[in-house]
Amino acid sequence: MENMIMNQLDYPILSWTVFLPLIGIPILLLIRNAKAIRWTTLLMTIITFFVSLPLLCGFDKTTYKMQFVEKSEWIPSWGINYLIGIDGISIFFILLTTLLSILCVLVSWKSVGTKVKEFHIAILAMETGMLGVFVAMDFFLFYLFWEAMLIPMFILIGVFGGENRVYAAVKFFLYTLAGSLLMLVGIVVLYLYGGRTLDIMALSQIQYPIKMQYWLFMAFFAAFAVKVPMFPVHTWLPDAHTEAPTAGSVILAGVLIKMGAYGFLRFSMPMLPDATLFFSGPILVLSIIAIIYGALVCFAQKDFKRLIAYSSVSHMGFVTLGLFALNTQGMEGGILQMVNHGVITGAMFLMIGMIYERTHTRVIADYGGFAKLVPWYAGFFMVLTFASIGLPGTNGFIGEFLIIFGAFKANMILGVFAATGIILGAGYMLTLYQKIFFQDADPDYEFSGKHPVRDLELREVITLLPLFVLIFWIGFYPNTFLEYMHSSVEHLLQQVNQNVYAGGENVFAKYIMEIF
Amino acid sequence: MLKYILIPLLPLLSFIINILFGRNYIKNRAHWIAVPAILGSFVLAVSACIEVLNGKVIDINVYSWIVSGSFNVSVGILIDQLTAVMLMVVTSIGSLIFIYSVGYMHGDKGYYRFFAYLSLFIFSMLTLVMANNFLIMYLGWEAVGLCSYFLIGFWFHKKSAGDAGKKAFIVNRFGDFGFGLGVILIFLTFGSLNYMEVFGAAGGIVGQTITLLGYKVDLITLICLLLFCGAMGKSAQFPFHVWLPDAMEGPTPVSALIHAATMVTAGVFMVARCNTLFSYSQTAMNTVAIVGGFTAIFAATIALVQNDIKRVIAYSTVSQLGYMFLALGVGAYSAGVFHLYTHAFFKALLFLGSGSVIHALHHAKQDDEQNMQVMGGLKKHMPITYWVFILATLSITGIPFLSGFFSKDEILWQTFQAGDLGKFLWFLGALAALLTAFYSWRLIYLTFHGEYRGDTECESRIHESPLVITIPLMLLAVGAVAAGWVGIPPVFLEHGDKIGYFLAPVLGHPEGHGTHAQEYFVIASSIFVAIAGWVIAYIMYIKNPGLPEKLFSAFRPVHKVLFNKYYIDEFYDKTIVQPVLKASDKIILAFDVNVIEGVVNGVPSLIGVFSKGLRKIQTGLLSNYAAVMAIGVLCVVGYMFFMR
């Protein structure tokens, strides 16, 4: 109990946040009218967001301990508790999830015309699932939410997606499931070794034998690497992102793929410090490959949405690079970059969805001259483009800079390779921007004359605005966000560095150094 | 404190207002916001400079920007002597160019956008020069690059403009790659990014080495070279010079302000700012000097044969920037900054003058015309433009007692004094001065002298530009003539080198070893080459207009190489651009689709093959199952029986 602070408020704020969306589902079942369904869902997500806001003010930034903890027995014979709480790492993902859920409802206002009820139920179920993953402090609860999330996502892609939706949905499902099952084995091992408890904090205190750490690390790695996704298990992502409806892509990019990295932070690192140190070398190399490989693939893309999807591979490469640099700057940069990526790529998918509603094409070559046709849209997308390539003053810079700083600190060569990703990023993003927005629109094409494309409407601007505020807020005053994570990150690094077996020596990193 | 912060914030405010409300409300009144904003900045900058002149140095941290573990960096401003000079250059020339743009951009559809971007640029540039630490400088650095991208691609409906903007941004990113790593290395070395702290501690790390790829590298040299990498990108030094000539796709005021007077000098400013670091590394200094000297002559040779009026001036800019780096590299920091300052006036004037020509021809022909070969004889139609052009040319070629003469001469003299390498570099510099004189006068003769080479009907419509254009030209002409009078060398006037003494607290004052006789020799030779270049141009383009053609055919291969800019663009395309695109398209994508996807899709199909095989067993016939079961039982029983 010494490593957690019970909920300070007089109401169970985390439970409310997590389960409010779920409460919306039975209400939706009673409603017939599509418009009423949309408004109810919107209201539910907005209420959830405002319920989650007090977390920010009530949060004690000086401690690494779990806060707002709620605990009650659930299945005592198995040692399973209902145990939830947050720390300086998970708090952002809670807020990012509650925020993005609102935007997902808003952006789908017109684009989802059939099966409206099912769609919104899936969104709400999704929200509860995601929030649950980030607050669960009991492995059973965690695994439950982790797997439960798959179902609404599967439906979102498989039912509401594009032409190839079934293939993408099945691929997404199988990939994730395969990883998760290995994690389940890992959890069972932890349970048995750790004295038949599933309390995550308690399990983090135990010293595991080195061989067991390696095996456990690989089991967890399988689940998390697929989610991130790391090279070479990334191929589900372009399909899933591209085929998913806009709301699905936003959730995928904004929250779902952060869960892999979150898993590393929550489980792999504190529980398996020796294995973390041992495997950090290869993971760093895989991250570098992901950064460069992901960027190079972007150059060849002909599909607007697919290009952004592949750019996620590159950006998430930055995230894992920062986390596994295993120093303060890298890790804080990595966590911040997860938020950033959620904001930027989330906003990009929102905007792609908006333009797709108008043009019904995702082929880049069909576009051109859109700066003239939809100037406000072009302006907004310009901001996203530059945030994505890490221009100072935007959030992308703060994250990428801290990550490259951390990587450089860990190993100079890594820093140098990571920095090339920034050149490549500028290359593919500016090329994309030029092809879509610059030059003159093809006069024969229907966008230019016969059916002029509408510019952004008020609802869409409102949808985008919170994310744009975040882009500049984090860009100019990142301390608001960094302050929350200092204690937790320091504590986590202490845990990792307490490795007994390796004696603080990074075997693999040394090996890598010898190659160069 | 507020008044210092307002210097960059006023233009930022103008940007925000114009970009948000320009399209629907402000439209062609955008200058009513932008021009007062920059004039306000100018006034505040002047007052700050007066404080600096009175010996005050302003160094304030405004707020803490990024804190992460031991990493801590603030948003802060530093106004010292060096910043003061830059502030004056940026806000004064900026103000004139804003006013000029009111006339030049009149009637353009993107009028409000233009002023918004220009304001953003001024904000970024001021941030760059007023920073008190490396990361804020980096912020300004990237932001000016962004504005440059916007403004080069201002007429984005032209493919060439979009391409040029993209090229500028990406080439600069190559430089910034080094700059960014340099900033990180500085923090890891000194534990701070604040200028004062870093420069104060620089002496302590001399001689330290780090191991890189198995080699021992001198730490301070590595830091300097990484920083210089960024400077080469922004200041368009070889081999990163390729973006600047293409940047001429932007509107001419942009070429004048960003791609001649201010932004491209950021690299020079940065090296001057870090002079404490560079002074500790002879290797880095020599690199700066050699890159500068080489670029000075390299770009000048290309300028000899170009026909686009703006491109000639663009290559001239690259060459003059080379001069500045040459000065920095031989330790004559204040000479480099002095040339930066005078160059800003006469180069802005040259660009705005050429803009005036383009503007007039645009109105006459209803089409853009920048090819000098179809101009000629504009002298009588545009007398003001012609005369300011002459003054700017006299200044840039180094005719005595004009601005360019003093600063260029200071550089050549300091270079001459700097040891053996110095003599060689001086020779390069003097040769470049000869070429400069030639191509500058060639430009004048082709554009303004002789007969108009277009159709006569069109000629009758050519007029001098309106006052809003010519007044800034005349003001700049005053600068082109007189700006250099703050740096008169001591051989002419005791205590004449005011700017050198002013900058000495930041940049130091080089100790000269040369004699007066040598100094007179250097001055005489610069005057000689300036006049020699002029005379050659006169002979080739006025006296004997057929001569250039004969020369070109005699040296066809040389002309072809120069005309095609040494084929460097083509080289980059073949070695960098195409390989990346090919790798992306052919190798990586193929790998992603075939290999990884092959494995992924292969597993299910493998399972499919298995299940197909297994399906054959599922016959559904009870007798089959019974038989298999019997065989199984027999096997098990047999095993138990015999093997035990």
Image (cartoon, rainbow, N blue to C red):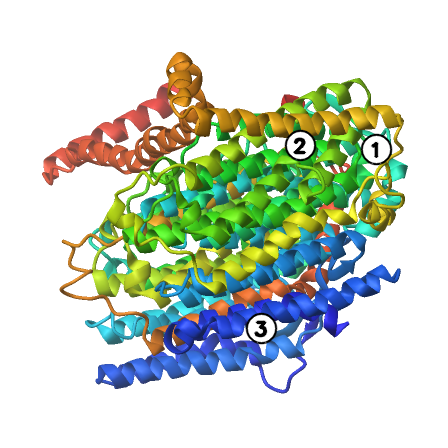
Q: In this picture, is A455 found above or below B68?
A: below
CA gap between label 3 and label 1 equals 44 Å
Residue at numbered disc 2: A509
In front of the other: B133 or A362: B133
Judge whether residue A283 can be spotted in this image.
Answer: no
Which amino acid lies under the numbered mark 3 shown in the image of this protein? Answer: Pro
Disc assigned to residue B36: 3
Is the same chain shared between marks 2 and 1? Answer: no
Q: In which quarter of the image is the N terminus of chain A?
A: bottom right
Judge whether residue B619 can be spotted in this image.
Answer: yes
Secondary structure under the numbered disc 1 in the rendered image: loop
Q: Which residue is painted at 25% across and 43% down in the image?
A: B455
Q: Which of marks 3 and 1 is nearer the N terminus?
A: 3
Q: How crowded is mark 2: few (under 14 residues within 10 Å), some or many (20 or more)?
A: many
Which amino acid lies under the numbered mark 1 shown in the image of this protein? Answer: Tyr
In front of the other: A86 or B61: B61
Which amino acid lies under the numbered mark 2 shown in the image of this protein? Answer: Ala
Residue B180, by quadrant, is top right
CA gap between label 2 and label 3 equals 57 Å
From the top left corner, tell me how far across and down residue B631 is, in percent: 22, 27
Name, please, the residue furthest toward the top: B554
Residue at numbered disc 1: B280
